[in-house]
């Protein structure tokens, strides 16, 4: 059968059938290109990147509102103010 006969029987365009045949060759490993599995993985990774970027932006904005002493891992256990010495001065 020719491509024209197949497209007429199925009611699709020649371009559509050629794209399907090309994708079939890619999926089978006969031609180089992006497989359906690779395309799905790429979509999922892009979604994950967008989510992480949004989370990062939220954290960046939240950090701008919090004083540095309230952030984990910052600040000191010592007081910043020095208290005056008690008792008599030493000589």
Image: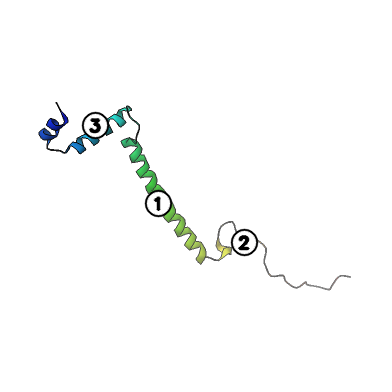
Q: Which residue is mark 3?
A: 21
In three-dimensional space, the C-alpha distance between marks 2 and 1, rounded to whole angstroms, equals 32 Å
Looking at the image, which is closer to me, 15 or 65?
Answer: 15
| Residue 26, image x, y percentages | 31, 31
Q: Earlier in the sequence, mark 2 or mark 1?
A: 1
Q: Residues within 10 Å of mark 2 (few under 14, many from 20)?
A: few
> Going 43% across and 51% down the picture, which residue do you hit?
52
Q: Residues within 10 Å of mark 1 (few under 14, many from 20)?
A: few
Q: Earlier in the sequence, mark 3 or mark 1?
A: 3
Q: Residues within 10 Å of mark 3 (few under 14, many from 20)?
A: few
Q: Secondary structure at mark 3?
A: helix
| Residue 60, image x, y percentages | 49, 60
Q: Which residue is mark 2?
A: 75
Its colouring scheme is rainbow
Answer left or right for 90 relative to 39: right
Q: Which residue is mark 1?
A: 50
Task: State which mark lies toward you, 2 or 1.
Answer: 1
Task: State which mark lies toward you, 2 or 3.
Answer: 3
């Amino acid at each position: 059968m020719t491509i024209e006969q197949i497209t007429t029987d199925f009611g699709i365009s020649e371009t559509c059938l050629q794209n399907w045949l090309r994708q079939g060759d890619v999926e089978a490993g006969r031609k180089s290109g992006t497989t359906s599995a690779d395309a799905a993985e790429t979509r999922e990774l892009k979604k994950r990147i967008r989510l992480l970027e949004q989370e990062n932006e939220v954290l960046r904005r939240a950090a701008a509102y919090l004083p540095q002493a309230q952030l984990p891992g910052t600040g000191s256990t010592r007081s910043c103010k020095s208290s005056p010495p008690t008792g008599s001065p030493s000589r």
